[in-house]
Image: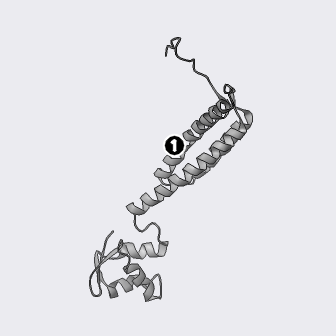
Amino acid sequence: MIQFNQSQPAPRVFLFSDDAMEVYKGLRRSINDIINGNPPDSVCGIYAKLEIYFIRFCLILHVMENLSVGSLPLPKISAETAKRALKLYDYFRHMALKVSGQIDAENDPLISYPIRFREVLSRLPAEFSTEEAWAFFSTATKNRKTMFNYLRQTHLFTRLDVGRYQRNY
């Protein structure tokens, strides 16, 4: 057990008011729905961390709001404070998912492409000719220009010679 001496203030416990608890329960339900939708593990981790952050945001905002008017913090966190904390939560959720998407795109350069093209791109050999590429692309599009638009993307392909390409992924 932690012993406090006279110079240290005694710890205080802050609870959610009934309305603030409803805000938290609504957030918890939405997180459960997202996690039950079977997202990647990285996304599950983001939501687990942000749930803890929401509680911390509530505590920080509650103390700041009360101290800014010169009073000691009340023992219950209000629904208004929880709603403000939810705005912070939404901002950090948006940013974390944005960064996660960028990291996923680096790890899998094909993730942002339509499924039909991902299938084509993943079946291409390590080195290939334009005609070999067209044999694969013709299953997804009838337009050769679309194929050339993909072949010009330097993060996906390197042009070795006229009509010869190498995959970069």
Q: Residue furthest right?
A: 19
Name the spot of residue 121 as percent of width and height, x first. 39, 75
Above or below, 8 against 163 in this view is above
Above or below, 116 against 143 in this view is above
Q: Quadrant of residue 85?
A: top right
Query: Mark 1 = which residue?
Result: 49
The residue that appears at 51% across and 12% down in the rendered structure is 5
- Quick one: label 1, few (<14), some, or many (20+) residues within 10 Å? few
User: Viewed as shown, does residue 143 lie left or right of 158?
Assistant: right
Q: Nearer the viewer, residue 70 or 102?
A: 70
- Give the mark count: 1
Quarter in which the C terminus is drawn: bottom left
Residue 17 seen in render? yes
Name the spot of residue 76 as percent of width and height, x first. 69, 29
Above or below, 104 against 25 in this view is below
User: Viewed as shown, does residue 143 lie left or right of 50?
Assistant: left
The residue that appears at 38% across and 85% down in the rendered structure is 135
The residue that appears at 65% across and 30% down in the rendered structure is 67
